[in-house]
Amino acid sequence: MLDKHHKLEAVGAPLLAPEEPPAFDLINPEGSAPYLLICDHASPRIPASLDKLGLDEAALAEHIAWDIGIRDVARRLVERYDVTLVQSAYSRLVIDLNRYPNHPSATSEQSGDVFIPGNHDLGPADVLHRADALFWPYHNAVSATLQRFLARGRVPAIISLHSFTPEYRGFRRPWHVGVLWHRDGRMAAPLLAGLEAIPGLCVGDNEPYSAKSPLGYSMDVHGMGMGLPHVLVEIRQDLIGQGDGAIQWADRLGALFAGILAQPGLLKVDHHAAG
């Protein structure tokens, strides 16, 4: 186990070994669905060069490392609804792909009650090293995929999938699902209405997090920045982390997305909607 003062990375040396996976997975690039699905926190993997960031396996299996269950939801949407998916291949603990890379929260040395030894006292060069290896390849893949949609004469929506913990700092979160959005409600408004119409669901409008004071990079840059319809969906982890929950939620969301995106005039570039 590394102590908190151990230097984990030598800037200039490759972060990823040749045998390790690339920074992202691009799945079903020719999918027919009219939206791009992205998962910023799909994996708990840590590059071997970072020696698990000084954490044990138990910590790396928890929410601090990734969004439990969301990868299974995304894969079901790909398989059943012919969706294109870009998903992360490494843990948010290395660098959070939904934060601006120069923001302190992108490489936090504390997550809840857990200290992250490998993120202690990182300098700007360390953060840049991680961003070059993981952050920019992922977001460049998202941008390139969106440009391929547009080059084929198709304006895509962007749907970002995340999951959240049932409890946070002693507060039991009542929501089953949250819809996060900022200024562009083209996707959020009908999605909220559709979810709220399902009996027994507790639906959060910008809960358990709010996109109205955003730290999030993905929807800010790829959605609002490009004028594309977009939304971020948070599903509670205990509903998708085991059994058939991920399949059920993927089918529920997939049916709602199909109806929403079939609305005339929704799939267009509109910078005013995001303003």
Image (cartoon, rainbow, N blue to C red):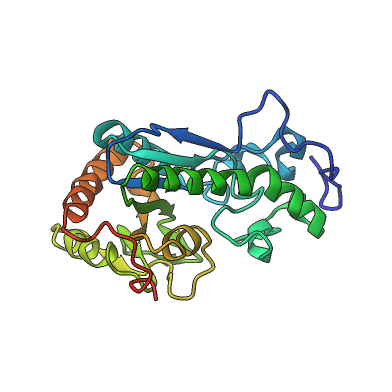
At which x and y percent is residue 200? Answer: 17, 58
In this view, 242 is above or below 182: above
Residue at 28% across, 64% down: 188
The picture quadrant where one finds residue 100 is bottom right
Residue 62 horizontal side relative to residue 151, left or right: right
Residue 82 shows up from this direction? yes
Residue 129 horizontal side relative to residue 239, left or right: right
At which x and y percent is residue 247? Answer: 27, 37
Residue at 37% across, 67% down: 181
In this view, 271 is above or below 267: below
The picture quadrant where one finds residue 123 is bottom right
Viewer-proximal residue, 219 or 169?
219
In this view, 71 is above or below 169: above
Residue 114 shows up from this direction? no
At which x and y percent is residue 207? Answer: 37, 68
Viewer-proximal residue, 211 or 4?
211
Instruction: Please identify the quadrant where the N terminus is shown.
Output: top right
In this view, 151 is above or below 172: above
Viewer-proximal residue, 120 or 155?
155
At which x and y percent is residue 38? Answer: 43, 47
